[in-house]
Image (cartoon, helix red, strand yellow):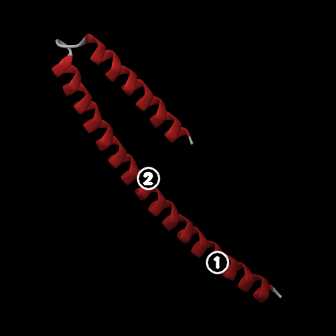
Amino acid sequence: METVVSGLQHEVGIIVKKQAEQTDDAIRVFSEQQYDFLASFRSRALKDHEALLKLVHTYQLFSPIFIQIVLFILIVSIYKIRTFLVS
């Protein structure tokens, strides 16, 4: 009887170990995908930020209303990004 119990425990241990390895692999793949997404998102955000700064710098002397429009667009964009990240 002890041999049967010992054999079952051994088999359960093997199955649990395989499942743990599969779970670790799935978590690793998912994490890599999410970090890739974050890096891409960060890169786009920085490029957009630089472009907006250039626009504001270029037109700040010529049109104060332009700055207000750009700031409004920026605020709306930040709201959309936050809404996207939360969902």
- Decide if residue 30 is on the left or right side of residue 64: right
Does 20 appear above or below 52?
Answer: below
Which residue is rendered at x = 50% and y = 40% of the image?
A: 85
Q: Where is residue 52 in the image (x, y as percent from the top left)?
A: 26, 28
Name the N-terminal-most of marks 1 and 2: 1
For label 1, the residue is: 15
Q: What residue type is labelled 2?
A: Gln
Does 11 appear above or below 29?
Answer: below
Quadrant location of residue 11?
bottom right
Nearest the viewer among 72 and 49 is: 72
Q: Position of residue 10 (x, y in %)?
A: 67, 81
**Camera-nearest label, 1 or 2:** 2
- Decide if residue 35 is on the left or right side of residue 16: left
Looking at the figure, which quarter contains the C terminus? Answer: top right
Which residue is rendered at x = 76% and y = 88% of the image?
A: 3
Quadrant location of residue 72?
top left
- Decide if residue 16 is on the left or right side of residue 53: right
Does 82 appear above or below 20?
Answer: above
Quadrant location of residue 14?
bottom right
For label 2, the residue is: 34
Helix, strand or loop at mark 1: helix
In the image, which disc is placed on residue 38? none
Nearest the viewer among 53 and 33 is: 53
Looking at the figure, which quarter contains the N terminus? Answer: bottom right
Helix, strand or loop at mark 2: helix
Characterize the local packing of mark 1: few (<14), some (14-19) or many (20 or more) Cα atoms within 10 angstroms.
few
Marks 1 and 2, how far apart at CA: 28 Å
Q: What residue type is labelled 1?
A: Ile
